[in-house]
Image (tube, rainbow, N blue to C red):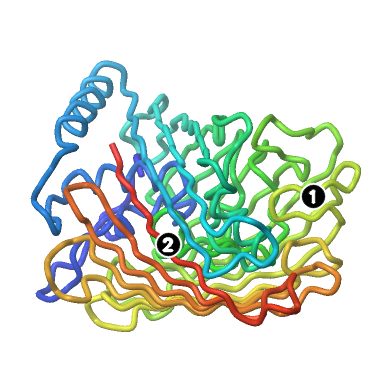
Amino acid sequence: MVATVDAQEASTVANEGSRPESDQDADPGLMSESAEDPGVLLSQIEQRRSQKDSVFQLDPLRPLHDSADKWAGNLEDATNLKMGAAFNHLFMWLSESPLGDDEYGVASALDLLGTMELANVGEPNQGQLFFQLQGRWQYGPPGPEVLGTENLGSLVGTANTFSEYVPTFLLRNLYWQQGSAEAGWIFRVGKITTDATLSTSAHIASPITFLPTAGTGPFANALTDSGLGIAATWFINDRFKVLGIISDANADRFNFGDVTEGDFYSAVEFAYKIAPKTAKAGYSKLTLWHTDATKDGQAVNGHLGPEGYGFFIKHEQELTADGRLVAVFRYGKSYKQSAVYEEQFGAHFLFYNPTKSGLQHDLLGVAVNWAQANVTGARLESNVEIFYRFPIIRNFDMTLSYQSLINLALDPNNDHASAFGLRLRTTF
């Protein structure tokens, strides 16, 4: 995050045996810990530039990365504009395709983002403008996200965010942010993204860790889409903060929604660090939310259209003194058929540097998810996922993943299917 932080929040554990630095250890962004939040993503990109270890010391992308780093550095020196980019690519194969013709899908996602410090630069109450352009496209058959739904009948999903946009590029975020943990408050106003703000974890995001929709998104919350809104956080102490958000219920990432309709989504979130073992410990959170009905009852993002309310709980816990083993438990429930899931649960376990190879970006993850969708006749569906992520060459990560999908929600004749993934990621 570019905003000022206090020394305790910015520090890292230096004791022998602590896990190496990873992109999840970048400054959590204060308002959000999501890897898809613009402030967090910029911090991750900067952190990743310093990590040189990889399985193969070949570096065919070095000229490209060096040129991008030099250009970004010169731009920041000249204009105070800090920029970054992240490219993600996913190949996915299904064990079968009973509801469609395709058993594989390929999609890419590109984020171009930046921030400019414009007010009280270097002070705790610093103000800055954030923007994020996002592009998503697929190749030939349906993208991996659509593949699981249309060809397997899965509502837990196989690959959140990996599907195309039409048009390909859009303005995902554009907001003013001011304040910091040191100031004791922070707020943002403009075009914001609620699902990158609420119930977030640095350890859960489809570009870097787990893939399924139910395993990454808190969609037992009727989350509105990216649109006009305001969010604010009050830092009560170094372990407890409260966040509030109000956003246009008709928000649409492809435009600026229709705030004049007077339909709003609102939420309050209480976040507390329970028994932290290192300075990298994340928050456990309770989110309470309510949404008005959308215009004409149209579904958008996690919101199915009706007025409704609910809650979402996330407990995050370091299981070892060095913080290498982390568990995240999530449970949410919605009411009045307002959210994608009536109920969802997930248990996620992450083991950083499992081989103690010193790769800095080595990660093993295992998760179990189940969800009951707000779809008439849908079964309770479960998903077991395991992945291994490693830097195959410098600043270029590869992830191998396997998903076991049990009792496909929309296909009563399919009790089990498998999904195999190969994900690639690089940042500039």
Dot 1 falls on a residue whose secondary structure is loop
- Relative to 287, is 207 above or below? above
| Rendering coords of residue 334 (x, y %) | 76, 69
Residue drawn at x 55%, y 59% as measured from the top left: 103
> Label 1 amino acid?
Ala
Dot 2 falls on a residue whose secondary structure is strand
Q: Please indicate whether residue 79 sits to the left or right of residue 213 in the image.
A: left
Residue drawn at x 31%, y 17% as measured from the top left: 79
In the image, 178 versus 109, the foreground residue is 109
Alpha carbon distance from label 1 to label 2:
29 Å
In what quadrant of the picture does the N terminus appear?
Answer: top left
The residue under label 2 is 421
**Which mark, residue 299?**
1
**Which mark, residue 379?**
none
| Rendering coords of residue 151 (x, y %) | 65, 61
In the image, 50 versus 406, the foreground residue is 406
The reply to whether dot 1 and dot 2 touch (C-beta < 8 Å) is: no
Q: Please indicate whether residue 185 sits to the left or right of residue 87 in the image.
A: right
| Rendering coords of residue 356 (x, y %) | 14, 74
